[in-house]
Each structure stands twice: as structure tokens, then as C-alpha cells.
Image (cartoon, rainbow, N blue to C red):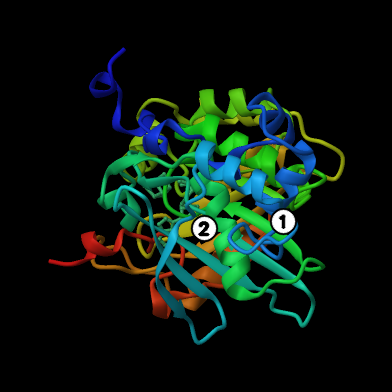
Amino acid sequence: MTESSLHPWDRAAPERAGKPSAYALLPEDFAALGAPGRAEHLFVQCQHPWAWVDDRPRLSRAIREWMARNLDLVLPEILERRVSEDGSTKLVLGLSDGEHIEAVHLPSEFRDPRLTLCLSSQVGCAMGCTFCATGAMGIKRNLTAGEIVGQVLVLLRVLGIKRTQRITLLFMGMGEPLHNLEHVHRAIRVFNHKQGLNISVRRITVSTSGLANGIERLARLSPRPWLAISLNATTDAARSALMPVNRVWNLARLRQALAAWPLGARERLTLEYVLMAGVNDTVEDADRIGEWMGSLRERHNLNLIRMNEHAASAFKEPDEGRLVAFADRLKARGCFVTVRKSRGRDVQGACGQLVRADSRRG
Ligand code: SAH
Ligand code: SF4
């Protein structure tokens, strides 16, 4: 198959001059590439932002020369750093082929050492959800595993994150992660590795628009992250109008894929529901969510998100009274509901506001 016959989202950035990214390699990959020195040591040096690649005194000259010859050591470049009034930070990152992505840091609301990073998995998105700014820009390409890991390393370094801080990763930035499962999963293996950032899969959540076949593939992989599903509507007609994915994988089929998800101990499924005024915010919608969930109600979190308004969509957020009535109705039906605080809106870093900087112009 030639490069041009692939769907755009199957095409990742070409590895620079055929070199693999140092940040996507596991210890066994360093060994397989014939790296001099201990493979674990090289892995640690590449993964710990506090033991950085450019100024790493603990690597011999021979190893550094080998790395420069054989690996791609370039990290995403910070083009813009915008700090929101609420303390969240959005980074616009430049990739080696000139594309841009965005990554967001959400500090803990409490004074504890927890933090959440919201990551992109693609440049743009092919899913075309009508309420989403990323959807409006279409798909450019998949991110490589090195670029996905690179987002985290750059964020941790620029924010001066300490090793002791507890990191949560959400694949809720730009893109549909299940359209780029191979690279997303490799990145998860790297994040999860004991000698690397050692982030538990309980702290890594992959959010999908509902590709049932992708959910089933992810369910079979190990390590397996936690899963979030963007529901956003309660009838097939309404959901297909908002999210074209529903025309292929409808609510019944999605429900089937979720029922088969092998929930681990203490694991919960997250359902995300973006509330849009006059579109999906009636108490009948709330009742239908309860019905659709059925037995899933035992092990889930239902996250209500206020629609973040933006220029690419006419949808509006509902008023507070409506939101409260919706949440109360769900609770009365036995759902575990949280209303997500919208953060980073003033820097366009909130859900569904992430777009490549240049597509916002004009
Ligand atoms: N593509 C994946 C992950 C990225 S989108 C997915 O769709 O799940 C992350 C979340 O942002 C999704 O739950 C999506 O429904 C939500 N979202 C998209 N546009 C939004 C908007 N304008 N306001 C609020 N949330 C939005
Ligand atoms: Fe893509 Fe998610 Fe936006 Fe839909 S909501 S267009 S799947 S990023």
C-alpha cells in the first residue's frame, strides 16, 4: 500500500530520516537497536524530564553520539504558552513537519501534588462532531508515539513538575485516540513502565466518541487504560445528527461494546455528556440515559460538561437551572453524576476548543 492510498489518519509523521523517536522506545527496543550501555539506563534518561537528554551528564560521550546518529531526539517545540485565570496552562506545540497540536495542564483544585494533563492523539479529527472545534478543522494526521510522549515530557519540564507529583493523563485533547490506537497504546506502555514515569493505568483515560470496534480492540490490549465515552445524545436520530460516528456504531452497538469491557477491580467507565441548550438537555434525555445504561449504572461516572461555545458551532450552554434539573433527574435514576468544571476557557484550552492555531485565523 502506498502512502497516498492511506486514510489521512493512518498516516503518521514520517520518522525523521528513518530514525525512531527516542521517546517512544522501551528498554527492550534500545537493546534490540544495539544501543551501547544499559538499555534501562537509556530509557530512564529519555523518559525523565528532570534528567534531560540535552544536558544529561550521566550519559557517556559514546552513548550520546550513538543516540544522535541513530535516534530522533527532537521534542515538540513550544510555540505558545497561555495561562488561564483558573491556573490551567495551554501549550501550543509545533511538530517537525510544521503541524501544531495543543496540550493542557490542569492543576489540582486542592493544594496537593496532583495534576492532570490533557493530551492530543491526532492533528485535527476525522469524526466531524458538530459541536467540536477540533472536528470542524478535519483530520491532518495521526501523532506518532514519540510525539504523544513528547507532549508530556515538554509539559512536565516547562511546568517544573516534581517527580513526586501524581500525574493523571487524559486522552481528551485533539483527535480520536481509537483512530490512532497503535501509537496511543505504545505511548501508554511507555508512560506505564516502572522505570519511566510509572503512571498507573488507573490514571490514564482514553476518551472515545464511540468507535465500538476500537473499544473492543482496546479491551484486549495490555496494559489497558480506563475508558471514557462521549455520549452526548440519547436517541439514534439526535446522536447521529451531532456525532456522525453514530451512523456506523449506533447506541445499541455502543452499549454492547461497553457491556463487554472487562472492568477491573474499582474501575469505572466514564460517560461524558456535553449539555447543549435546547438540544439534549431535557429531563426525558436524562431518563433515556438511565434506561440506556441499565446495569452499567453500577460501575460508572457520568460527567456532565457545559458546552464550551466557539465560533465553529452555534450550540450554546444551558442555563444553570436546567443543568441542575438534568443532574438531579439522573441522580434520582441512580446515576453517579459529576458536573465538570470548565477550565481554561479564557485561553481556548477547554474541551472542544482545541484547534490548530492557524485554522483559527480567517
Ligand atoms: N475524540 C475524543 C476525545 C477528545 S474530545 C472524544 O470525542 O471523546 C474530549 C471531550 O470533549 C469529549 O467528551 C467531547 O464530547 C467534548 N467536547 C467536544 N466539543 C466540546 C465543546 N464544544 N464543549 C464541551 N465539550 C466538548
Ligand atoms: Fe473528534 Fe472528539 Fe471532537 Fe468528536 S468530540 S470531533 S471525536 S475530538
Identify the element where label 1 is drawn. loop
Number of dots carrying numbers: 2
Residue found farthest to the front: 62
In the image, which is nearer the foreground, mark 1 or mark 2?
Answer: 1
Asked if disc 1 and disc 2 are in contact, CB closer than 8 Å, the reply is no
Mark with earlier residue (1, 2): 2
Q: Residue 264 placed where, x, y %? A: 82, 36
Q: Decide if ligand 1 comes within 8 Å of the CB at mark 1.
A: no
Question: Residue at 71% of width from left, 51% of height from top?
Answer: 60
Instruction: Identify the residue position indicated by label 2 in the image.
Output: 283
For the point 52% across and 72% down, the residue is 342
**Position of the C terminus by quadrant:** bottom left
| Mark 1 surroundings within 10 Å by alpha-carbon count, few (fewer than 14), some (14 through 19), many (20 or more) | some
Percent coordinates x, y for residue 145 in the rendering? 53, 40
User: Relative to 226, does residue 261 appear above or below in the rendering?
Assistant: above
Return the residue at label 1.
336
Q: Amino acid at mark 2?
A: Val
Single out the residue that lies furthest toward the bottom: 85
